[in-house]
Amino acid sequence: MKAVILAAGEGKRCRPLTLTRSKVMLPVANKPILEHIINALVKNDIKEIILVVGYKKERIMDYFEDGIDFGVKIEYVEQKAQIGTAHAILQARDLIGQDEEKFVVVNGDNIIGPDSIADLISGEEGDATLLTCKKDNVSGYGVIVAKGKKVVEIIEKPKTLVSHLINTGIYLFKSDIFNMIEMTAISTTGEYAITDTLQMMINDGRPVTTAVTNAEWLDAAYSWNLLEANTIVLGDFETDISKSRIEDGVSIKGDVSIGSNTTIRSGSYIVGPVIIGDNCDIGPNVVILPSTSIGNNVSIASFSYIKNSILMNDIRINTHNNISSSVIGSNVSTGPNFITEEGEELHIILENELHEAEKLGTVIGDDTDIGGNVLVHAGKMVSSNCRISSGKTISEDVPTNALIK
């Protein structure tokens, strides 16, 4: 069986992190979201993968290449204009072929576990099968109205509660889905949506069924959702510190994974689940608390405190930093006494829409330099390639390329 992974979009709701990479390449537990998806497919013996790419495609292709290092065979096809999921799936038609009995389609920006894929495959009964999961709060999701396993209606982001079954965006199709897509009219949003194709099939009396999963699935719609995803994935890690250099006087508790050529200096205190990458220099006297991922080539100077955060690659954290519930992009440097406030149930405006973050410190884009004694108020974001002078308090979002003196 083959799998088509949709990885062409930017993920605008995850800006500023997606200004320099597509959403599928955002790291969770030090691996891109897309790599976690590929691993889930491999565990279900699905090793022929078609990646539909578009935005920042070179970064994806340079990382995964032909897939051999990940135990798969990868072929690429480009969606030159991101005009919907059905259009994206249609780009894979020539690589799937008409003789393919069935194939899996997965959104490349969701966190999924191997059991989710297994539930989809084992639950297949119709011409198309949708993987669904139950949620108490279905706000912002497409929901499924079903009778038994038969899908009756697909409703995108309903205003009132009609069902607790949400569409995960993971499907099992037969190859004639391509013909059905070509018969689908463009939606009012100007896109070709696969849900419109499926609803057309339902209206025509074709069997469209649902498979329900209780396994791992998370839509990291916004940058702060990466923190929740990070916590979930880190829960599956086990302690591995065999390749690191740990000085006397270091205290490590819980499951902690530390990469090769990384030094943890005396007096540091680490409580897992935590993952630290290769070629890092931590401490002395640094505190790292649960649900924290630290990438490769990161240095954290003495008396800094990191909790429930994602630090990407090539970051320099100075002394006496306090970073909580934050996502820090690549190639960021901070001065001494940099502090991120942590807030709960925050109201955040993105693309002129109001959204709520359950818990967040800040999100900082790539290639940003921050001076000493800087405080960022909870929920305020700093974009990429910014320069913030020492002694500043950030109480508003900072736009790209900003210079704050």
Image (cartoon, helix red, strand yellow):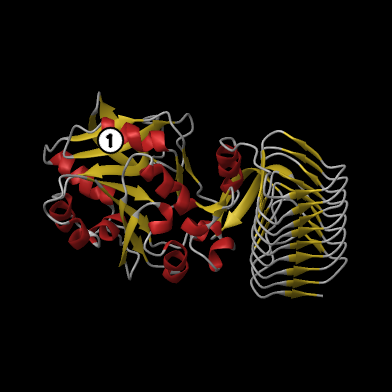
Q: Is residue 9 left or right of residue 18?
A: left
Q: For this rendering, which residue is in front, 215 or 246?
A: 246
Q: Quadrant of the C terminus?
A: bottom right
Which residue carries the number 1 mark? Answer: 121
Q: What residue type is disc 1 on?
A: Ile
Foreground of the two, 293 or 379: 293
Is residue 334 left or right of 82 when viewed as pictured? right
Crowd band around label 1 with a 10 angstrom C-alpha radius: few (<14), some (14–19), many (20+)? some
Q: Nearer the viewer, residue 262 or 10?
A: 262
Relative side of 348 to 127, left or right: right
Q: Nearer the viewer, residue 61 or 390?
A: 61
Spot occupied by residue 202 in the image (x, y as percentages of width and height): 17, 39
Judge whether residue 178 can be spotted in this image: yes
Give above or below for 52 relative to 340. below
Q: Check the image and name the residue furthest to the front.
A: 242
As drawn, 125 above or below 111: above
Determine whether the residue tagged by mark 1 lies in a helix, strand or loop. helix
Query: Can you give x and y, in whole percent of width and height, for residue 109 in the image?
Result: 45, 52
Identity of the residue drawn at 21% across and 60% down = 95
Can you give x and y, in whole percent of width and height, for residue 314 in the image? 68, 65
Classify residue 79 by image quadrant: bottom left
Q: Residue at x 19, y 57 (%)?
A: 185
Q: Quadrant of residue 155?
A: top left
